[in-house]
Image (tube, rainbow, N blue to C red):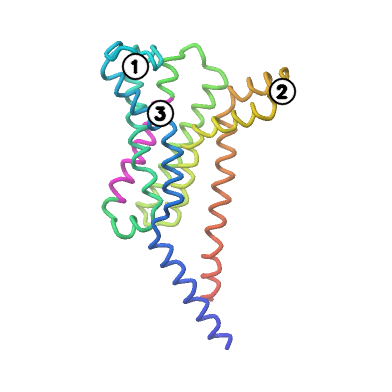
Amino acid sequence: MCIETKSELKMTAQLQHTKQDNKFNWPVVISLFLLTAIPGIPAIFIVALVLLGDGAIAGVSQLINAQYFYAPAAILTHGSTGALFFLTMPWQFSPRIRMRRPIWHKVSGRIAVVSGCLMAMSGVWMHIALSPDELGGRFIALVILSMSICIAFSVAVVHVVKGRIAQHQIWMMRAVALALAAITPLFTGAILQLVFSAWTGLYEVLAALHHDYDRLIAIVINLIVVEWVIQQKRIPWREGSALTQ
């Protein structure tokens, strides 16, 4: 009876994994699209206006920072790679596409990794081009974030090249969490204002700290969340492996 129970549980676990592989994973894919759209859609708009040139469209070109037209290389690199990342990265988290469209998964994955790393590095370049005198805590946090993104994506690539798919998926999750750390400050800043704006003196101090170290705070928050998600995903696999013993 014990053997039969273990066999039944093992079959149930395998069926669950098969169902997971056939899922499109809409909630995660759509959530990633919505989050990356926050900088991704404006990036497409900015790239188009910079390519057209200052004053090309009366009343519209003035909507973006005038400095962008004086550092077009950095802006175009960061904006175009950010737009590519926005358009390709979310699809990597659909098991159905990964299983049924492996070529698309590989091609879009390579584009997502390369564009993600270039986006991270060009973010530092853009900061230097637009704010050469601001090299304090905010710049250091940006460099740390950019390096972390590149390292995480590189580790993910090494794992997939060596055939360690599970580890590849985990490091892709970490890399994307780090990339999204550029967006998290929008939410932490809104929460900060909502909670502390009534205390003017305290809010000014906290806002200044948030401005300088918001990316580091975002890295910590995002990694805590993604590590929790990873642990939740590992639980079924641990149960499945235990059943085979």
Three-letter amino acid code at the position of disc 1: Val
Question: What's the CA distance linking mark 3 and mark 2?
Answer: 38 Å
* Residue at the image point whose x is 40% and y is 60% from the top: 23
Q: Which residues are magenta?
A: 105-123
Q: Decide whether residue 117 is among the magenta residues.
A: yes
Q: Residue at x 47, y 47 (%)?
A: 173
Position of 18 with respect to 198 (left or right) is: left
77 over 27 or under it: above or below: above
Residue at position x 44%, y 47% in the image: 172
Residue wearing tag 1: 60
Q: Earlier in the sequence, mark 3 or mark 1?
A: 1
Does dot 2 land on a helix, a strand or a loop?
loop
Q: Are marks 3 and 1 in contact (CB under 8 Å)?
A: no
Task: Determine contact: label 1, label 2, CB under 8 Å.
Answer: no
The secondary element bearing badge 3 is classed as: helix
Q: Quadrant of residue 208?
A: top right
Q: Quadrant of the N terminus?
A: bottom right
Query: x, y (%) of residue 155?
Result: 43, 45
Nearer to the camera, 201 or 133:
201
The residue under label 2 is: 198
Q: Which mark is residue 121?
A: 3
